[in-house]
Image: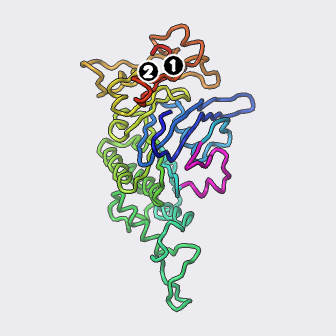
Amino acid sequence: MMIPKTPVLEVQDLRVSFFTPARELQAVRGVSFALGAGETLGIVGESGSGKTVTALSVLGLLADTGKITGGELRFHGRDLARASQKTLREIRGKKIAMIFQDPASSLNPLMSIGKQVGEMFIAHPETLDPLDREPDSRYGGRRLLRRGPSGKEIDRRVTALLSGVQIPDGGKRRHFYPHELSGGMRQRVMIAMALACKPEILIADEPTTALDLTIQSQIIRLLKDAGAETGMSTIFITHDLGLVAELCSRAMVMYAGMILEEAAVDDLFDAPSHPYTLGLFNSTPGMETGAARELRPIPGSHPDMIRPPPGCPFSPRCASAAPQCFAAPPPRRAIGGPESGHFARCWLL
């Protein structure tokens, strides 16, 4: 694990499983990483690799069948894996916020978007400036520190947030319902909700999925600007290597619940080392690793995580796999020396 100078989040040997009465599905298997202050960390990998489960574990939002079976999740030294629900509720949205994958299913269809964004301030009224609160006529017009923010105060902040994420005429559109907005607009609403309380960490889980390239570019710009303005740290989860190159300073390649490669983005793109990372590059349009080439898909399919492979999880799909690759999990090796910050898990390196 590469440890930044000022880590705000440290994940150590995280293990997460989902249980049924008869089976255990091992979704995350020994993931470790650290997120630095103001850093944008990319987690890339195909569907089912454990990216989203890792993020949901940080916020304590696993499904009822999911359980953290090992490891630590430390936010400024506090272990979130063992925190109470009260503590997690205080942190969610205020300190660590998340943009979920599908805004159509994440937004409540029966509530206006203004009310949904405004709920962030009702949950965390301490994030509002008390001097902006309306005077209470019952006390001669004097300003008071009341428990809850006024409706006018929330409306002002919601309108400003919607305008800030480039939703035109936010004062009018805050009365709209999710079905009255385009996919790009709904995603902007999700970003507004996530940024409402100016969190220290933003987890963006596939925030540009199913958006056209123009809207995708605008969303990326919004996330960049938000991080630059507040010094926020970001975990950017995606299957798109191009977005990692555009937005992130460091990246981890995840497969079958494990981190198979980790490096600064420039190093990862200049010298991808793990066969799975190379497979991702070779199967992605526009990812040039040398001379002009045709796309080569990765053969095979993702392993069964109820019975994961005993060795390297990628060994059944790897054309270079040797006998030891099937026998035991590979060690974590430094690429270019331990000070390079470039690591990969592969027996053949």
For disc 1, the marked residue is 314
Crowding at dot 2, Cα within 10 Å, few <14 / some 14-19 / many 20+, comes out as many
Q: Say which amino acid is labelled 1.
A: Phe
Q: Earlier in the sequence, mark 2 or mark 1?
A: 2
In the image, farthest residue toward the left: 292
Secondary structure at badge 1 equals: loop
> What's the image's color scheme?
rainbow
Q: Nearer the viewer, residue 331 or 207?
A: 331
Mark-to-mark CA distance, 2 and 1 = 10 Å
For disc 2, the marked residue is 274
Q: Say which amino acid is labelled 2.
A: His
User: Looking at the picture, does residue 22 appear above or below residue 316?
Assistant: below
- Cβ–Cβ below 8 Å for labels 2 and 1? yes
In the image, what residue occupies the spot 61% across and 17% down?
Answer: 310
User: Looking at the picture, does residue 33 appear above or below residue 38?
Assistant: above
Where does the image place residue 5, in percent across and percent down from the top left? 45, 43
In the image, farthest residue toward the right: 21
